[in-house]
Image (tube, rainbow, N blue to C red):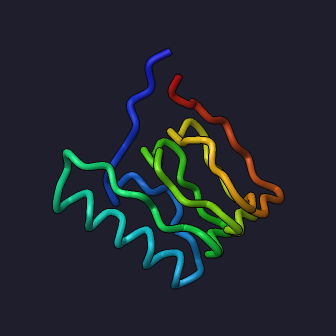
Amino acid sequence: MTVDYQRSRDDVVTWPTDPRARRALEEWFNKLDASPAVHPTLAAGELDFSGADLSGLDIGDADWVSATLRDNRLRWRRCSIGWGTPPTATRTESQTHTDG
């Protein structure tokens, strides 16, 4: 199956309600805009992404260590297997396509 991953602010279905998590996502988009050929890391570690729908985003290099993912939708987003303390994920709908 081919999935076209998105890399635009306009593709965020629902933004996280936590201001710090929202700011981290904004900063990630700023880095993408500044250098589209480079894939920056989404610095999501220890942040609260509750309520966000990040479905379809190309967040392959996200740092989810100790992040909170509650009541999220993360369908068909590109991600890599992380290390360290896993995120807290409750009531989260997730379908993942990983590379390799």
**Nearest the eye: 52 or 29:** 29
Q: Is residue 94 above or below residue 65?
A: above
Q: Position of residue 30 (x, y in %)?
A: 26, 67
Q: Is 78 rendered above or below residue 30?
A: above
Q: Residue furthest bottom?
A: 19
Specify the quadrant of the image occupied by residue 31: bottom left
For the point 53% across and 75% down, which residue is it? 21
> Horizontal placement of 31 versus 15: left or right?
left
Furthest-left residue in this view? 34
Looking at the picture, how far across and down is residue 23, in whole percent?
43, 79
The count of marks equals 0
Relative depth, front residue between 33 and 61: 61
Q: Residue at x 55, y 67 (%)?
A: 44
Q: Residue 52, relative to residue 22: is it above or below?
A: above
Point out residue 59 in the picture as x, y percentages from the top left corner: 46, 49
- In terms of depth relative to the viewer, which is nearer, 40 or 89? 40
| Residue 42, position as x, y percentages in the image | 45, 61
Q: Residue at x 60, y 63 (%)?
A: 52
Who's the residue at 34% across and 72% down the image?
27
| Residue 33 sits in quarter | bottom left
In the image, farthest residue toward the top = 1
Quarter where residue 40 is shown: bottom left
Instruction: Please give left or right for residue 31 compared with residue 89 in the image.
Output: left
In the image, 99: left or right of 91? left
Residue farthest to the right, as pictured: 90
Is residue 27 found left or right of 42 in the rendered image? left
